[in-house]
């Protein structure tokens, strides 16, 4: 069973990683505790879009900081 991690889990992976786990572990622990979501096509697209938006936001913050540094 493949799941997408919603947070870092020691020994398993980092946030937004797609990992393969045993079905019982995924269904009974990771998903019910809110640590992961099932890695279907819709969820993969959603995660990829979130990663793109976070990268864009980080780039904008960096650009703003460089402009402020230049002004000083």
Image: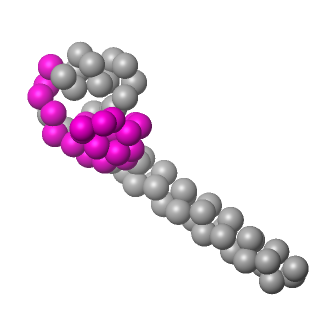
Q: Is residue 4 visible?
A: no
**Quick one: which residue is furthest to the bottom in this view?**
70
Tell me if residue 19 comes above or below residue 28 in the rendering: below
Residue 36 x, y percent position in the rendering: 34, 32
Quadrant in which residue 13 is drawn:
top left
Quadrant in which residue 31 is drawn:
top left
Secondary structure, magenta segment, majority class: loop
Residue name at image x 73 percent, y 77 percent: 66
Q: Which residues are magenta?
A: 3-24
Q: Is residue 16 magenta?
A: yes
Residue 47 x, y percent position in the rendering: 40, 48
Q: Nearer the viewer, residue 4 or 15?
A: 15
Q: Is residue 6 visible?
A: yes
Quadrant in which residue 53 is drawn:
bottom right
Residue name at image x 39 percent, y 44 percent: 15
Residue 2 placement, left or right of 58: left
Residue name at image x 22 percent, y 21 percent: 27
Q: Identify the colour scheme used.
A: one colour
Q: Report the number of discs.
A: 0
Query: Where's the N terminus, which quadrant?
Result: top left
Query: Where's the C terminus, which quadrant?
Result: bottom right
Q: Is residue 55 magenta?
A: no
Tell me if residue 19 comes above or below residue 29 in the rendering: below
Tell me if residue 67 comes above or below residue 34 in the rendering: below
Residue 36 placement, left or right of 64: left
Residue 43 x, y percent position in the rendering: 35, 42
Residue 13 placement, left or right of 59: left
């Amino acid at each position: 069973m493949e799941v997408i991690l919603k947070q870092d889990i020691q020994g398993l992976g980092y946030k937004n990683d797609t990992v393969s786990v045993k079905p019982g572990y995924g269904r009974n622990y990771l998903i019910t505790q809110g640590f992961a979501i099932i890695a279907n096509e819709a969820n993969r697209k959603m995660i990829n879009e979130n990663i793109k938006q976070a990268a864009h936001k980080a780039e904008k913050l960096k650009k703003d900081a460089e402009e402020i540094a230049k002004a000083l």
